[in-house]
Amino acid sequence: MDFVYFLANASLTLRTIEYLRFMEHGAGASITVVHQIDGWIIKIRYPQSLSLSNRGDFRAFMSELGISYEPDMRLQMVFWSLETGQSPVEVMRRYQVAIVSHGIPDTKDIEAFRQQFTRGLGYCPETLA
């Protein structure tokens, strides 16, 4: 069961990861996080189907943070490539995207990306706040 959302900034992405880590139905979920100039695209994959109640809770939570997103063909190919076991670095080169995290949800990947990006720029863009 897959869900794809657009989030405006890093803080919302971090909240999503924390939610997945601490919710019972988040166990076993994997996440792919892609940074774009205007925000973050996250794909959450649950290994099993969620109950109607858990699905409703998850959608309600995500609707407060961002919007449901229909990826274009390029992003669909990015997600498919990662799911078939291709290296994130190889996928980034091929499709010219910034894959920040893929796999088990971990806030450290987001924090490291945010620090490196802002250090290189010398300021913090709104999407990294």
Image (tube, rainbow, N blue to C red):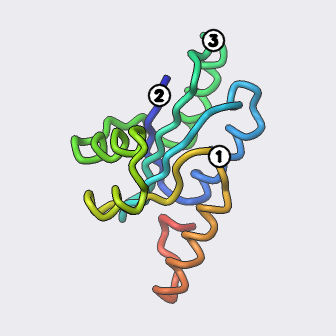
Under mark 3, the amino acid is Ser
Disc 1, SS: helix
Q: Quadrant of residue 34?
A: bottom left
Under mark 1, the amino acid is Ile
Circle 1 Cα neighbour tier, 10 Å, few/some/many (<14 / 14–19 / ≥20): many
Q: Is residue 56 rendered to the left or right of residue 1?
A: right
Q: Is residue 34 rendered to the left or right of residue 30?
A: left
Q: Cα distance, mark 1 to mark 2?
A: 15 Å
Judging by the rendered image, the residue that carries numbered circle 2 is 2
Residue at the image point whose x is 77% and y is 37% from the top: 22
Residue at the image point whose x is 48% and y is 86% from the top: 120
Residue nearest the observer in this picture, 82 or 71: 82
Q: Earlier in the sequence, mark 1 or mark 2?
A: 2
Disc 2, SS: strand
Q: Is residue 17 rendered to the left or right of residue 128?
A: right
Judging by the rendered image, the residue that carries numbered circle 1 is 17
Disc 3, SS: loop
Under mark 2, the amino acid is Asp
Q: Cα distance, mark 3 to mark 1?
A: 20 Å
Percent x, y for residue 92? Answer: 35, 61
Residue nearest the observer in this picture, 113 or 37: 113
Residue at the image point whose x is 67% and y is 62% from the top: 108
Q: Earlier in the sequence, mark 2 or mark 3?
A: 2
For the residues bearing labels 3 and 1, Cβ distance under 8 angstroms: no
Residue at the image point whose x is 32% and y is 35% from the top: 70
Percent x, y for residue 80? Answer: 34, 39
Q: Cα distance, mark 2 to mark 3?
A: 14 Å
